[in-house]
Amino acid sequence: MKKVSFVIPCYRSSHTLLHVVEEIDAKMKEMNGYDYDIFLVNDCSPDDTLTVIRQLCGERKNIKGISFSRNFGQHAALMAGLRFSDGDYVICLDDDGQTPADEADKLLEKLEEGWDAVYAKYDHKQHTAFRNLGSRVNERMTRMMLGKPADLYISSYFGVRRFVVEDMIRYENSYPYVIGLVLRATKNITNVSVHHREREEGSSGYTLKKLLGLWFNGFTAFSVKPLRMATAIGGTFAGIGFLYGIYTILKRLINPDVPMGFSSLMSAVVFFGGMIMVMLGLIGEYIGRIYISLNNSPQYVIRERINLEE
């Protein structure tokens, strides 16, 4: 009998988590030939989410609880759940009920067909305009920086085979980015259409600051393209500056009465100085991440494990 592990990062979901778990139970009871367990990872939620996780784990041995010592983010929570999971297939989904747990069979069907990973695709997303904009930016970034196929839709609801999980958890650096890890492991990925629900209560935990941090982490952790782009931009502007210098000299030789332009000179200095600082900052970010990784900064710190052996 094949086993399915469900991994759910939990944050401010004390009122929705029980419903998500009940949906998983109902769907898996309908399906024959699968054993399953559920990993609930509390990302140091400020509400009663941990209390709900303890209650669920106390009632059922196939529900496992993990609680972080502080907020490490959704991707760190996914990595913790993946490391403890042992299913032949692993399905990751949200805790707010927007990702339909009762359609997990669609993801499993695609995995059974031979796909290594499958992402849920929403025909009509119920996110806010801000979140939809963030998704579009993230989609464009993963295409440019990580080589994601243009026709592949990426979401937080996905399933992967065991060997993909094993490759993903080899990554132990401080800045995990799950999408990049999946794309690094395999290109045999497909989509399946599911229904996207409206949020039952509350609002998304992704602020503008968190989204920017996630995007920046994505393209600096798994790609050197930003450095190559900085090199190309620097070379382009250096060439423009050289040609402009020749133009200025020729203009001065042809017409000695042409006044020297202090304003244009200062504009050029400020512009090119700003470009240099941006590129140096980008290089510094890469070096800083190397430094943090060499110091063995953890992806997460677990304060409590429930129904899990030490």
Image (spheres, rainbow, N blue to C red):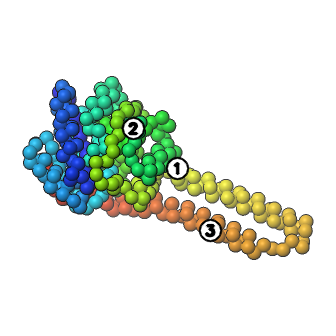
**For numbered disc 3, what is the local secondary structure?**
helix
Task: Name the residue type under label 3.
Answer: Gly
Of marks 2 and 3, the one in the foreground: 2
Give the labeled residue for mark 1. Answer: 225
User: How far from the left and from the top, in percent, is residue 37?
Assistant: 18, 39
10 Å crowding of disc 2: few (<14), some (14-19), many (20+): some
Q: Residues within 10 Å of mark 1 (few under 14, many from 20)?
A: some
**Residue 32, horizontal then vertical, whole percent:** 18, 25
- Report, in whole angstroms, how far the alpha carbon at label 2 lies from the one at label 1: 29 Å
Identified by mark 1, the residue type is Lys
Residue 96 x/y as whole percent: 28, 48
- CA distance separating discs 2 and 3: 44 Å
Kindly identify the amino acid type of the residue bearing the numbered disc 2: Tyr
Residue at horizontal 80%, vertical 62%? 246
Q: Please name whichever residue, 111 or 130, is drawn nearer the observer in this view of the structure.
A: 130
**Secondary structure at numbered mark 2:** strand
Which SS class for mark 1? helix
Q: Which mark identifies residue 273?
A: 3
In the displayed structure, would residue 61 be above or below residue 286? above
Residue wearing tag 2: 122
Which residue is rendered at x = 33% and y = 62% of the image?
295
